[in-house]
Amino acid sequence: MPESIAGIDEAGRGPVIGSLIVAMAVCSKNNEKKLKKICKKDSKQLSQLQRLEILKKLEGICEFRHIEISAQDLNQKMDNMSLNDIEAQAMANLIKKVKNADVMIDLPDRYSWVFKKRMERFGVLKFEAEHKADENYPIVAAASIFAKVLRERQVDEIKNETLVDFGSGYPSDPKTRNVLRNNKEIKKIDKYLRKKWKTLENVMQKKLFED
């Protein structure tokens, strides 16, 4: 019988700037009660400060691992792979590093049977996956918080390096859209752009139309 539980979630799937973070939290079943008290909400329902405070507590009872897929890696991989396959491969690689654990994943595909086939191609058969698992399972919420904190740190690092305030990096963010329509600023963040994203193409096409 597995002695641990593991949860997997991602942060940064939708942005056009920066990395995709796929994270796993692992916790002993002996610490499940503590986990439930600490981790009552997923990352999207928390402020940045709340995520940091909760993560400090979680680090006392959970082990965290992650895979960061940079914008440049995504640009290269998406020549031959879909985003869903890239994410599934990262999740499979994380699962292979944990032993004797019940694994729950926040389901990235629309249908569970599709995701199951993806994971089988990457050599992983034993796991559970559900939509909104980050809301319903504290261990997945823990992974969600960890992934979000890492993503936010990386965004801050890019801003400090490039001196470009692009906001969140999501195409719905006015700050992000403004940067993508500014030729000087977009050159500064070029290596952090996900150039295979249709959303990026749409913003750029709108720029051309408006010009």
Image (tube, rainbow, N blue to C red):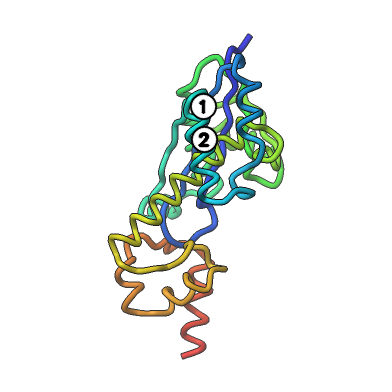
Q: Quick one: label 1, few (<14), some, or many (20+) residues within 10 Å?
A: many
Residue at disc 2, secondary structure: helix
Q: Is 18 rendered above or below residue 185? A: above
Q: Where does residue 46 sit, x and y in percent of width and height?
A: 60, 48
In the picture, measured across the screen, residue 40 lies left or right of residue 197, that is right
In the image, what residue occupies the spot 64% across and 49% down? 45
Q: Where does residue 158 sit, x and y in percent of width and height?
A: 34, 58
- Pick whichever, 170 or 205, lies toward us: 170
Q: Is 92 rendered above or below residue 50? A: above
- Type of the residue with mark 2: Met
In the picture, measured across the screen, residue 42 lies left or right of residue 175, that is right
Q: Where does residue 206 sit, x and y in percent of width and height?
A: 52, 81
Q: Where does residue 150 sit, x and y in percent of width and height?
A: 43, 45
Q: How far is the residue under mark 2 from the one under mark 1?
A: 6 Å
Residue at disc 1, secondary structure: helix
- Pick whichever, 56 or 78, lies toward us: 56
In the image, what residue occupies the spot 53% across and 25% down? 26
Residue 182 visible: yes
Residue that mark 2 sits on: 91
Quadrant where the N terminus is found in the figure:
top right
In which image quadrant can residue 32 be found? top right
- Pick whichever, 208 or 166, lies toward us: 166
Furthest residue to the bottom? 211
- Pick whichever, 118 or 166, lies toward us: 166
Q: Quick one: label 2, few (<14), some, or many (20+) residues within 10 Å?
A: many
Residue that mark 1 sits on: 95
- Type of the residue with mark 1: Ile
Residue 82 visible: no
In the image, what residue occupies the spot 56% across and 41% down? 144
Question: What is the total number of numbered labels drawn onto the structure image?
Answer: 2
